[in-house]
Image (spheres, rainbow, N blue to C red):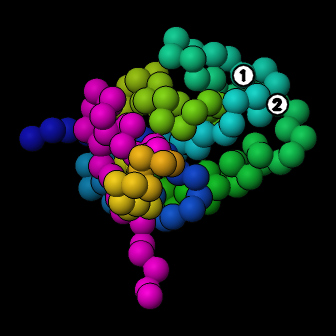
């Protein structure tokens, strides 16, 4: 049986189902939780680029509030993790989301990645791309993809 020591969950704050799944997985396996959000390139003043071309936040003068919003999203998840008794840490990376998720997972030696998906069909993925598809196709560790809640019609 695979033993997960580190669970990385990528969140943009749009859906809590992936976060809930990551909390459950970390709790059930005794793993630490890494909560990642990705902000657009150039959001931070002094981002440090890594080998894959994504950037990590080091310090910033965030004029438009992007970093504060990202930190607020993460803080909510960290509060839940604390309630569950989990060891958790936040990560804010710059760059294209799919590449940044993969780079963060490699850098932090994550054993599993948890991402959400809007569940778009083939045409939607073709036109708009899919971060979760990119992560699944390129990750070197298992990926748990959690479909977002579908609105009732």
Point out the image quarter for the C terminus. Answer: bottom left
Q: Quadrant of residue 109?
A: top left
Answer with left or right where residue 115 lies relative to residue 3: right
- Residue at point 44%, 56% (across, down): 124
Instruction: Give the residue at mark 2.
Output: 60
Answer with left or right where residue 107 lies relative to residue 13: left
Q: Quick one: 117 or 3, which is closer to the camera?
A: 117
Answer with left or right where residue 122 lies relative to residue 128: left
Point out the image quarter for the N terminus. Answer: top left
- Residue at point 57%, 17% (across, down): 53
The residues colored magenta run 129-153
Badge 2: residue crowd in 10 Å (few <14, some 14–19, many ≥20): few
- The spot of residue 54 in percent (x, y) is 58, 23
Compared to 56, does 142 lie above or below? below
Q: Quadrant of residue 57?
A: top right
- The spot of residue 112 in percent (x, y) is 31, 39
Disc 2 on helix, strand or loop?
Answer: loop
Query: Can I make out residue 25 in this image?
Result: yes
Determine the residue located farthest toward the top in the rendered image: 51
Instruction: Give the residue at mark 1.
Output: 47
User: Which badge, 2 or 1, is on the more N-terminal residue?
Assistant: 1
- How many numbered tags mark residues here? 2
Q: CA distance from mark 2 to mark 1?
A: 8 Å
- The spot of residue 110 in percent (x, y) is 37, 32
Disc 1 on helix, strand or loop?
Answer: loop
- Residue at point 62%, 30% (across, down): 95
Compared to 35, does 147 lie above or below? below
Determine the residue located farthest toward the left in the rendered image: 1
- The spot of residue 24 in percent (x, y) is 33, 60
- Residue at point 59%, 58% (across, down): 13
Badge 1: residue crowd in 10 Å (few <14, some 14–19, many ≥20): some
Q: Are marks 2 and 1 in contact (CB under 8 Å)?
A: yes
């Amino acid at each position: 049986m695979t033993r997960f020591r580190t669970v990385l969950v990528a969140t943009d704050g749009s859906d809590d189902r992936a976060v809930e799944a990551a909390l459950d997985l970390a709790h059930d396996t005794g793993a630490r939780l890494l909560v990642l959000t990705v902000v657009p390139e150039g959001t931070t003043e002094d981002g440090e680029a890594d080998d894959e071309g994504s950037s990590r936040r080091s310090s910033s003068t965030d004029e438009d509030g992007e970093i504060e919003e990202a930190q607020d999203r993460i803080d909510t998840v960290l509060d839940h993790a604390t309630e569950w008794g989990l060891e958790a840490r936040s990560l804010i990376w710059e760059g294209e989301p799919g590449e940044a998720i993969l780079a963060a997972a490699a850098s932090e030696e994550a054993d599993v990645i948890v991402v959400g998906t809007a569940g778009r069909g083939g045409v939607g993925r073709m036109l708009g791309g899919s971060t979760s598809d990119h992560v699944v196709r390129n990750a070197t560790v298992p990926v748990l993809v959690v479909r977002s809640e579908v609105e009732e019609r």
